[in-house]
Image (spheres, grey):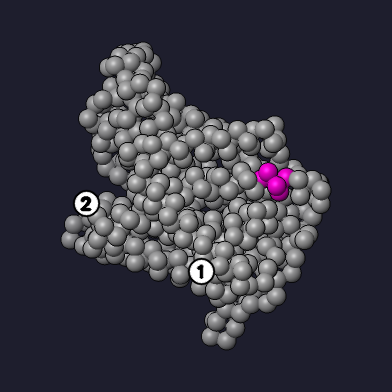
Amino acid sequence: MGAHPPPRSAGAGGTPTTTAVPPVGDPGGGATGGQSPDGLQAGLKNRHLSMIAIGGVIGAGLFVGSGAGIAAAGPGILLSYALTGLLVVLVMRMLGEMAAASPTSGSFSAYADRALGRWAGFTIGWLYWFFWSVVLAVEATAAASILTGWVPAVPQWAWALLVMVVLTGTNLISVGSFGEFEFWFAGIKVVAIVIFIVVGALAVFGLPPGDHPVGVANLTGHGGFLPHGPGAILSGMLLVVFSFMGSEIVTLAASEAPNPVQAVRKAVNSVIWRIALFYLGSIGVIVTLLPWNDKAVAKSPYVAVLESLDIPYAGTVMDIVVLTAVLSCLNSGLYTASRMAFSLGERGDAPKSFATVNKGGVPAVAIYASVAFGFVATIFSYTSKDTVFQFLLNSSGAVALFVWLVICFSQLRMRRTIERETPEKLTVRMWLYPWLTYATIAMIVFVVGYMFYDPDGRKQMVLSVIAAVVVLAVGLLLDRRRPRQAAPVTGQE
């Protein structure tokens, strides 16, 4: 999340102005004078970063999308989440190694720029921006659907417009206002999940609100732990892999904190327990308490558990939690898209205006550009839901896997560069380098291959590859026409 070239201040009439970008290379990895290493306002507090890191792995997909995974794999969905979670832990370790050495708003895009070439930074940066800009429309529509159920007198499109405008405003005011909103949004998600796990665990052992120990009947009955066979584990991975997108946001946000290196280190070291608790813990409660093939589980697994325990107003409670998760994702999605656009502009891979900040220290033009695309996509979600909007969803669907692959390949080369140039900055190290990095690449390539094989994942992967090829072609064409601009990654070129 945000890092940028100093000093940018607002000119007359609030028009952003830009100055030259000095090399980044603060030995301590911190920010001075209230700015991040690449010029954005360092306005995120430690508590903001902590909650962004914790809440980043809890998306709305966990609450509403996990039912499809359970239906596809049965109790074996736990293995799907565990394997996908392992991938995320390994990728985050690699990203954390690079981010702790060189915090920057471009994160993996900036690292790919230096390690692999400008074409790589350009391609993955724009694909990532595209992904989150589409997510804005998805989350705005989801929030509007819930709000319309509560206040049907207000049209759904009006609710979508309202939440987009409000969260755009919070992002434009300052990075601190974004952090504050995200702190409370993420806090509500975390508290809700923890309460759910505690209540569910008590019920599993026959304590109130349960009335008898459940045992393992639901895990081994109803066709067994793998009712659809071992292959369903991979099918389940395809359904859950994208719910983990967002865990990398903290490495972008860290550069707008007073001590980015410490923030990255804490986030990377805590990713294992976050995934184990929030994903494996909550899904484990669901498949232990209820039969996996229960229709209510497929529709809304968390509501099904609460209703089975006679928790009053279970549906309303979960609607509030899901709405919070949706708003959190929209809030952080707008932040993330704008910071990536900002970094692309900084490196000459997007309009220069993207690389400017307003008097509040935020990249206003990049925010406006991101939310504009989000607004257009939201309109398509109502006018062309099954055509244009479905195309946008499918063509951005596999971006998570592309991002992870780029992180792996970048780390392979960046590790050697850091060891050679600034070994004192290698405060986070990838385990068993380079062999575990190679193994992670092989795992991701296997998942990509399986998506081509799987009938449900094939269309998404094909369209995503086409989108990636188009962006890559543009990047290669521009790379030939323009002189190289150094990516502000380590301050040593």
Q: Tell which of 307 and 227 is nearer to you.
A: 227
Q: Tell me the quarter of the image containing the C terminus.
A: bottom right
Q: Residue at x 32, y 40 (%)?
A: 456
Residue 400: x and y in percent read 48, 47
Q: Residue at x 50, y 50 (%)?
A: 183
Q: Which mark is residue 56?
A: none
Q: Tell me the quarter of the image containing the N terminus.
A: bottom right
Sequence order check, earlier mark of 1 and 2: 2
Query: In the displayed structure, would residue 355 be above or below residue 205?
Result: below
SS for callout 2: helix
Q: Tell which of 250 and 492 is nearer to you.
A: 492
Q: Quadrant of residue 265?
A: top right
Q: Quadrant of residue 270?
A: top right
Question: At label 2, which amino acid type do we have?
Answer: Gly
Question: At label 1, which amino acid type do we have?
Answer: Ala
Q: Is residue 28 visible?
A: yes
Query: Which residue lies under the disc numbered 2?
Result: 149
Query: In the displayed structure, would residue 72 be above or below residue 441?
Result: above
- Of marks 1 and 2, the one in the foreground: 1
Is residue 408 shown left or right of residue 157? Answer: right
Q: Residue furthest left?
A: 153
Q: Residue at x 32, y 23 (%)?
A: 228
Query: In the displayed structure, would residue 96 be above or below residue 466?
Result: above
Query: In the displayed structure, would residue 390 be above or below residue 445?
Result: below
Task: Give the crowd class for mark 1: few <14, some 14-19, many >=20 residues within 10 Å.
Answer: many
Looking at the rendering, the stretch of residues picked out in magenta corresponds to 411-415
Q: Magenta stretch: residue 413 in it?
A: yes
Q: Which mark is residue 366?
A: 1
